[in-house]
Structures are given as structure tokens and as C-alpha cells.
């Protein structure tokens, strides 16, 4: 058999997780793919669990625990495929995940590596690609966002993706010598991506169609010796990487800068992306911390139980086993860690945190998590609603230039939708590529029945960024004057609309 | 990290013996977030093919074949060859915190099932600051 893809799963203990992961991987494995599990000197029953999979997997056993990079390199050395798929054992692949990654790589010959969308069990984002912040360090972009947010579901080119699920061409991997084993259980994936790009071996991409659930913190030892890896990263890359997080936010319409004839400019930021504090930092930080702690404590109440066979036919149980037909096995606390005070302490902590959050909320009437008064985004939305209510006839079809913000299309009395739109009428997820694309989208929606185009102040930069679009609007459609936002009447030519406006004034 | 979780057995409900299944099981040891169960099962008339371990979502999270040697049980049931290897041992591992349950069911070679027992556990946080 010719092997196209080698799935390499490095494991160190956690046999239960490994078994669950393997079951899911093998369930949908294409015929031209192989699975290689690298047992990185697991101290538990991993070897026995892996033996149960017989010929379905290949096992590479390391005598000494060497960490993620070394285990992945060992797996890659044993691999026969032209593509290597590195996979953590603490992920649960979703339907079609591997086909999506392979398909993406096949469709993008310029890409050397492609990463997947990883969600926490509650559906929020764990990984949608890696961006480099203004601090020069890598960050999982949009971590904590809803998994279905448009910004999370855009395939894109990035500088790095996580190694928790990474498909990479074997040639590119070999060209840079694989993972750098100087990194220990952190940042080796980022380093690999950066070296691949630096060597000209290909691009790094993100493919959201491949989705997996990642129990990130369940992996053993991922934070071991983090400082050493961080120091290595700092020395090698911090001053060289392109700090691209803001680019992503702007590209996704979550952050914008509005320029006027003089400063101050106005920054528009999606409330999901950031909170702007003006003189209320301390209070907001305290509230956010309380929220975060409360959430963390609540998350603690989710337990996943797994089980695995021990022994497997070889070892005799002997006298230590439950013995005799009359033996009773009543309720048992076993005396090991039993302490009812633990649970009481947990509940007391949760109650204290709830009280703290309530107190902080009470101190911040109006909502401390809203953007600050200088930003005024929430006010801006209200102003747009008021302008539309005043200027647009009831029942009219309206499209609003937006970044997917649902609040902007919740307009009373009219039929409102996003601009631009996807095929299903929802937010397209991105801005038009250029002015021509913006015009084409406008005309498409107009022919589909759109009667008014609303340009909120947060989108006024469109007119500078897409001058063709601005000329198109200005030459063809009437602008209904309103200080709160721009409204173009798509059914009326400039002259006629101006006349009506004058008459009605 | 779940490494710091301390697994605690809140309750063990033992359905053995019953009219279809003989046997016994108990918690052998707890270490951190893992516990070991040990026991034996022997069908009253049919042979036990496997033991399914089922979680709160009614998902089979593991399957164990009773195949460990049990000379003591073999001595009790000399006419039942299966008794010689009717022992089993399994490890339960908890990820996260909170309470959960595992049911153990014997599946006979004719496809029918009989309950073995239920295990109720909590995974607690010894020290949040740790």
C-alpha cells in the first residue's frame, strides 16, 4: 500500500485518553493513511492499551521520556507518508477532519503546513491559528471566541499553527530538520512553522473545516520547563516575527481606526475582541478576574471518566483480588483522599466569588464591560437605529455595512441584513477584497431587493479604502443627510432623492 | 491540569450476585486521579463475553474481558472451565473536577446483559493555589 498520510501521535501516559483518541482516528481513517503512536516512555498501561490495537497502528517505543519534539521526530522517522499529521492524544477529531486537512493541502500547493480549528468541549475556541502580538510572543488568536464566529471560520494564511493537530508535508518537515528538540513541551510547533517559512519551504495555513475538540490541559507535561522553551523562542524569534495580531483583527472587521481631518482618531473595536477602559481599569480588571475565576471554578465541576483494562490476561490476581462467592463489597470511601470538607470548601468559594461579582457589578452601573465613553460603540449602534427609524420607511429592505455585529442589524420596523453577505444571507465574514467587489456585492443585493444601504460611522473608512465604491455610491444613489450615519437610497437617483429631501424638509 | 485532582469514591453499588451473574468486585486502590477496580464474574448459565463500562452519557468508555486467572473461583466451580479465568481488573481515570458515575455491565455470549454495579466518584481539588 502506498501511504499518503502518516498520523503521528506522541503519548506519555494517559492511556485512557489515547484509547479514546485512537478509536476516533481509526474510525474514519482513509485506506492510504497509517497511524504511528510514539510511546514516550509512558509510566502507565499505555503499552498494553496500544497492544490491543494490533495491526491497526504502528508503535514506536522510546525508553526515556524526551518530550513532544523528540517523540514527534521519532514518529516522523518511522513514517512512510508524504504528509505527516501530528496529533495530540488529548483531542477528539470531528467528522471529516482529516479529509478537510488533506483536501486543503491538496488545493493549496503553496502551503507546507495546515492547522485545524480546535474547540474546547464547551464549543469555544482553543485554537484558530497563532498570531504574534505586539509583545512579540505567539498567541492563539480568538481563543475563547464562540466556535462559530465568522472570524474563526475563515481559512487563512498565518505564520504559525499549533502542533496539537498539524498536517505538514514531509519534504518541508525534513528540509528544516523536524522539530527542534531544544524546545520542551511548548513552542516547538511555533518554531517549526517559523523555520519552514524562513527556509522558503512553504506557507503556513489555517483550515477551520477541520475541527477537533481539544482537552488542552489534560495533556501531561505540556507546561514542563516552559521557561526554557520561552527563552529559546525569545532569543531566536521574538525580534524577527511579524507582529500580526492587529492585522488579523482589522482584516476580520473586529478593529478599525476612523480618521478625521484632525486628531483624535476614533478606534472602533468589537466588544468581543477587547474592552477599552478609560479610568476604570482597576474596577474592570477586578471584575474580569472575578468572572474568570468564577468560570474556572464552575468548569471544575465537569469531570470525564474513562476506564481501561489492567493486566490483560498475563498477571494472576492472586489473594489480593476480591475473593469468595459470599464476599460483600459495600460502599467504600477507601480512606485514601476522602474529605467531605473539600466539597464544602468548593461551594463556599463559589458562593464568595458570586457575591464578589455581584458587588462589582453593582459598583459599575451601566455595565463595566461595555466600551468606554470615548469609544462609544454601543451608543453608535443606538444612533444608527435612531437614524434608520427616522429616515427609512417602515418595511424597507436595508443592508448595513457591518463586521457581523448582530446588534447593527436589529433595526425596528425594517428588514435589515448585513453587508456584505454570504450565500445564506448572513455576514460574509470578511470585507470585500477591493472596490469592485464591494460594488458587485452592492448591486447583487440591490437587484435582490435591497432598498437602502446604511454606513455606520464605524464603517466610514470604507469610503476612503474603497474609492471606487464611494464614487459608485455618490454618482448613483441619493445620500439621505443624517449626522448619525450615512444612508443611501438605492432605489433613487441622486437628483430625485435630493429633491424629495428638500421638499420634505 | 487534572494532575492535581484527587479521586474519591463516594459510593459503590454492588449488583452481585444476581440471578444471572455471580461474582464480586471492589476498589483495590486509589492513586491521585486513578483508581483500580478488581473482581470476578461468572454467568449463572451463559458465559460472560465481556464487561462494558458505561459513563453518565450512556457511552461505553471501555470494555474489559474477564480473563485473569482465578484459581480460588475455579476451585469453587470445578464444573465451569470459565471460572479459571473469570477475573478482571480495570483502571478508572478522571479528567477535570466534579461528580460522575460508571456502570459496569456484563455482556453474555448470547448478547444479553446483566448489571455488575455502579461506581460514584468525585474528583476534588486539594488546593486551588497549587
Image (spheres, coloured by chain):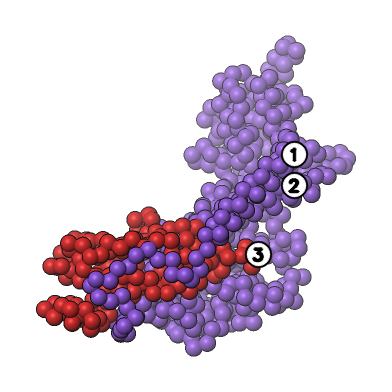
- Using the image as rendered, state which of residue A247 and residue B45 is in the foreground: B45
Which chain shows up in red? B
Q: CA distance from mark 1 to mark 2?
A: 9 Å
At 56% across and 43% down in the image, what residue appears? Answer: A428
As helix, strand or loop, the secondary structure at mark 2 comes to helix
Tell me whether marks 3 and 1 sit on the same chain. no
Q: Residue furthest right?
A: A262
As helix, strand or loop, the secondary structure at mark 1 comes to loop
User: CB atoms at circles 1 and 2 under 8 Å apart?
Assistant: yes
Classify residue A11 as left or right of residue A240.
Answer: left
The reply to whether residue A256 is visible in this rendering is no
- In the image, residue A451 sits, relative to residue A465, either above or below, namely above
Q: Residues within 10 Å of mark 2 (few under 14, many from 20)?
A: many
Residue that carries the numbered disc 3 in the rendered image: B129
- In the image, residue B12 sits, relative to residue A247, either above or below, namely below
- Using the image as rendered, state which of residue B61 and residue A75 is in the foreground: B61
- In the image, residue A279 sits, relative to residue B12, either above or below, namely above
Amino acid at each position: 500500500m502506498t501511504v499518503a498520510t502518516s498520523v503521528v501521535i506522541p503519548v506519555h501516559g494517559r492511556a485512557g485518553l489515547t484509547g479514546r483518541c485512537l478509536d476516533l482516528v481509526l474510525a474514519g481513517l482513509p485506506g492510504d493513511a497509517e497511524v504511528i503512536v510514539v510511546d514516550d516512555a509512558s509510566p502507565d498501561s499505555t503499552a498494553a492499551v496500544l497492544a490491543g490495537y494490533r495491526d491497526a497502528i504502528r508503535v514506536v517505543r522510546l525508553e526515556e521520556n524526551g518530550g513532544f519534539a523528540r517523540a514527534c521526530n521519532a514518529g516522523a522517522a518511522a513514517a512512510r507518508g508524504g504528509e505527516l499529521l501530528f496529533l495530540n492524544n488529548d483531542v477528539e477529531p470531528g467528522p471529516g477532519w482529516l479529509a478537510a486537512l488533506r483536501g486543503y493541502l491538496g488545493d493549496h500547493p503553496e502551503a507546507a503546513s495546515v492547522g485545524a480549528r480546535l474547540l474546547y468541549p464547551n464549543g469555544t475556541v482553543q485554537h484558530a491559528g497563532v498570531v504574534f502580538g505586539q509583545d512579540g510572543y505567539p498567541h492563539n488568536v480568538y481563543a475563547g471566541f464562540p466556535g462559530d464566529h465568522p472570524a474563526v471560520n475563515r481559512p487563512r494564511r498565518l505564520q504559525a499553527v499549533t502542533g496539537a493537530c498539524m498536517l505538514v508535508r514531509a519534504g518541508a518537515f525534513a528540509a528544516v530538520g523536524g522539530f527542534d528538540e531544544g524546545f520542551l513541551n511548548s513552542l516547538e510547533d511555533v518554531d517549526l512553522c517559523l523555520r519552514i517559512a524562513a527556509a522558503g519551504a512553504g506557507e503556513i495555513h489555517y483550515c477551520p473545516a477541520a475541527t477537533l475538540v481539544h482537552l488542552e490541559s489534560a495533556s501531561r507535561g505540556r507546561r514542563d520547563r516552559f521557561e526554557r522553551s520561552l527563552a529559546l523562542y525569545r532569543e531566536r524569534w521574538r525580534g524577527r516575527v511579524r507582529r500580526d495580531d492587529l492585522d488579523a483583527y482589522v482584516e476580520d472587521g473586529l478593529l478599525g481606526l476612523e480618521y478625521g481631518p484632525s486628531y483624535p482618531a476614533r478606534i472602533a473595536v468589537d466588544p468581543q475582541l477587547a474592552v477599552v477602559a478609560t479610568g476604570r481599569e482597576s474596577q474592570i480588571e477586578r471584575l474580569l478576574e472575578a468572572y474568570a475565576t468564577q468560570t474556572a471554578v464552575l468548569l471544575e465541576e465537569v469531570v470525564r471518566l474513562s476506564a481501561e483494562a489492567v493486566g490483560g490476561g498475563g498477571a494472576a490476581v492472586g489473594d489480593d483480588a476480591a475473593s469468595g462467592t459470599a464476599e460483600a463489597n459495600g460502599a467504600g470511601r477507601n480512606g485514601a483522599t476522602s474529605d467531605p470538607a473539600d466539597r464544602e470548601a468548593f461551594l463556599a468559594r463559589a458562593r464568595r466569588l458570586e457575591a464578589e461579582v455581584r458587588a462589582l457589578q453593582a459598583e459599575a452601573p451601566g455595565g463595566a464591560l461595555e466600551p468606554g465613553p470615548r469609544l462609544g460603540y454601543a451608543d453608535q449602534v443606538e444612533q444608527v437605529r435612531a437614524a434608520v427609524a427616522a429616515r427609512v420607511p417602515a418595511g424597507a429592505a436595508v443592508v448595513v455595512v457591518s463586521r457581523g455585529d448582530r446588534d447593527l442589524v436589529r433595526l425596528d420596523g425594517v428588514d435589515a441584513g448585513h453587508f456584505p453577505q454570504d450565500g445564506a444571507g448572513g455576514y460574509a465574514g470578511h470585507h470585500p477584497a477591493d472596490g469592485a467587489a464591494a460594488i458587485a456585492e452592492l448591486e447583487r443585493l440591490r437587484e435582490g431587493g435591497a432598498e437602502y444601504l446604511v454606513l455606520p460611522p464605524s464603517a466610514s473608512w470604507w469610503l476612503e479604502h474603497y474609492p471606487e465604491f464611494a464614487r459608485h455610491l455618490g454618482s448613483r444613489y441619493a445620500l439621505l443627510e443624517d449626522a448619525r450615519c450615512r444612508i443611501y437610497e438605492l432605489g433613487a437617483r441622486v437628483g430625485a432623492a435630493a429633491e424629495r429631501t428638500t421638499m420634505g424638509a | 491540569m487534572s494532575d492535581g485532582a484527587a479521586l474519591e469514591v463516594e459510593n459503590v453499588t454492588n449488583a452481585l450476585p444476581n440471578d444471572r451473574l455471580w461474582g464480586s468486585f471492589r476498589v483495590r486502590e486509589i492513586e491521585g486521579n486513578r483508581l483500580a477496580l478488581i473482581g470476578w464474574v461468572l454467568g449463572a448459565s451463559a458465559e460472560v463475553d465481556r464487561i462494558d463500562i458505561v459513563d453518565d452519557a450512556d457511552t461505553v468508555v471501555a470494555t474489559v474481558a474477564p480473563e485473569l486467572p482465578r484459581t480460588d473461583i475455579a476451585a469453587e466451580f470445578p464444573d465451569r472451565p470459565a471460572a479459571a479465568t473469570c477475573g478482571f481488573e480495570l483502571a478508572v481515570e478522571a479528567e477535570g473536577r466534579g461528580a460522575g458515575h460508571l456502570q459496569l455491565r456484563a455482556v453474555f455470549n448470547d448478547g444479553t446483559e446483566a448489571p455488575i454495579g455502579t461506581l460514584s466518584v468525585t474528583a476534588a481539588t486539594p488546593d486551588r493555589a497549587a
